[in-house]
Amino acid sequence: MSDARSDILGAVKAALKQAGGTGKADTTTVVSSSQRLGDPRANLIPARGRLGAKARVDLFIREAEQASATVARVSSLSGVPREVARFLAKNNLPMTLKVAPGIAEPAIPWTRETLLSVDEGRANGSESASVSRAFAGIAETGTLVMLSGSDNPTTLNFLPPTHVVVISASEITGDYEESWSELKEKGQDGRFMPRAVNWITGPSRTADIEQTLLMGAHGPQRLHIVIVDEETPAP
Amino acid sequence: MESTTAAFRENTAKALGDAKLRDALSKLTDGFPARRREAIARLPEFDALRDAARDIKDHVLANLDFYLEAFEARVVEAGGTVHWCRTAAEARTAILRICKTAGAKTVTKGKSMIGEEIAINEHLEVHGIEPVETDLGEYIIQLRYEPPSHIIAPAIHLSKEQVADTFREKHHHLSPGRSLDEPRVLLDEARGELRRKFIGADVGLTGANMLIAETGSIVLVTNEGNADLTYSLPRVHIVIASLEKIVPTLEDATTILRVLARSATGQEMSVYTTFCTGPKRQGDLDGPDEFHVVLLDNGRTGMLGGEFHEMLRCIRCGACLNHCPVYKAIGGHAYGWVYSGPMGAVLIPGLIGIEEAGHLPNASTLCGKCEDVCPMRIPLPRMLRTWRRRQFERRQTSYPSRAGLRAWSLIARRPWLYRLGADIAVAALAVLGRARGRFRWLPLAGGWTKLRDLPAPEEGGTFISRYHLGEHGDGA
């Protein structure tokens, strides 16, 4: 295989050199390329998401609903279970949930005031509904940013037919670039990417049969976003 | 995949005579292009984003060796492996070896045009491994042993009745009397069938919309969520991607994502955009134990730096297909290989040879709509003309065409001769057509007049001759 590697890289270099010397020999472009990787800069960012905090959350909600998600707002984390129970009841769904370990009891008091039956962990395909925690929301397109990890298994995002996502209003950013910056700041030794970053914009869908749009192709048929408006406690 | 591109004329005749196909294709115009227009109208920066996206890929291609090596280093750091493959055969071998090492019996697949390009399904089947397409459209055409007819909507050529017939024939463990009248019922049946496959698969094979050099991540874009179940459930995740899919940074990928879905389906963003980086981490409750990237050349380095260099900017959104009058008339299968539409007509000759695919660059009106809508601003009409020129230079064009082109170039380069010829022709047609007012047959234009009449010109000469006579019109 190493043969193939050097053949391919050799062919690339030869083609570029012949086309005008932008291959390895041209050190200026390589320097600019390494700078580009070392200090990534945002390209043009659409103005749409550049809003104050309140308008940003409103835009996020509008765009998420446009993408067929449903959205509810609660005033604190402890209000999440009642909202989820209300949502399940309204849709005639069983009162059982698989929740991400990061938001299991005691982080959220799931059963204190509800009849929810709650289990934590990854999904295996038998669950009817899951709850996970978003890292960020992108107002620009109503997109959720989910990070994989021991506290937030990826399978919860895709296997159950109903997916509920909890996000704090303060985590809603204007554009994708802001959420990349936040993720990079949280990283250690330049390593910041979890195994999977999932942008989710509305519930799963397909139009593969006669271009008829249908929800719930392989992923969830329902995506419900619960925004927590909690004031951050004073330090 | 075996190509039937050489039989393009026969393919086209068959497609034009297929009433079901015409019905299916007629829905295309109201669907994707209309939604694309709406999405673009909502984003004032769209054209500026296209420029930015084009510049990103131009920069990558000019420094491709640097970014490929950087990408490989990051994949390895994240615990993955990169397999460099020169040809389709090498890629098939690499994928089969990984599957065999994993003891795989079933491989679930996300939709991958590169997977089609290297015909991986057939290869796995021959070696006793069951490949299962999981994108709904791909699943349907896999059951029917058909190639995709559109790069993002592979089963767009089929009616729901045809899908129902296929499901009835292939899902024989289900009740034969069940109703399959509605797309919803068909989807639910496929979802149920595929759920079992997802859970039982040993290896997940996906393509990649982009590869990110900064982080060693691969980007997957779907609306169904099938790619996400494909990589997150099996023990092994294999990514098959061609060299030119690389972009420098997450920010660069983000810019391209802003133009991709809008150009493809008219969505603001596809439902699922996923960035996968290496295998399962310590403490993770799900995810694959192994992460392999099969990096394929298969003719790309041959296009690099040459006349078709800019084709390597293509992000496979399908906008050029959706807006092409030729694609809309004949559909994707007539093109005879994996790709179709204007991007296919440029790419296929580059990948399988102009000798085999010579008809494709000629099956175009050069109306320019493809370039107008291309998010990466690829000059597709120019490249189609380049292929035509090469065919002419290599004497692959038929003798009558060559003679005709020579005569045309002789006349077109001499304005006095052109005008003289036009004056004589118009005068002759006007006289000959005086009685009927139209022609039902003309010499050398039998193909054209077979299906329509040519109206006879009015007496009084050509535009130029009337212009010289002072008929300049009023008001100007």
Image (spheres, coloured by chain):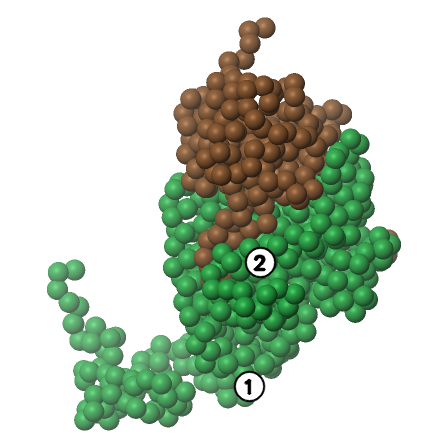
Chain colours: A brown, B green
Give the residue displayed 30% in from the left and 86% down from the top.
B453
B77 or B362, nearer to the observer: B77
Q: At which x and y percent is residue B93?
A: 82, 62
Label 2: how many Cα within 10 Å (few below 14, some 14–19, many 20+): some
The residue singled out by tag 2 in the image is B189
Quadrant where the image shows the N terminus of chain B: bottom right
Q: At which x and y percent is residue A91?
A: 47, 38
The residues bearing labels 1 and 2 have C-alpha atoms spaced at a distance of 51 Å
Give the answer, above or below, for where A6 lies relative to A82: below
A13 or A149, nearer to the observer: A149
Give the residue displayed 56% in from the left and 82% down from the top.
B397
Give the answer, above or below, for where B185 lies relative to B159: above
Helix, strand or loop for disc 1: loop
Q: At which x and y percent is residue B279?
A: 77, 41
Total count of labels: 2
The residue singled out by tag 1 in the image is B398
Label 1: how many Cα within 10 Å (few below 14, some 14–19, many 20+): few
Left or right: where A11 falls relative to B453 = right
At label 2, the amino acid type is: Glu
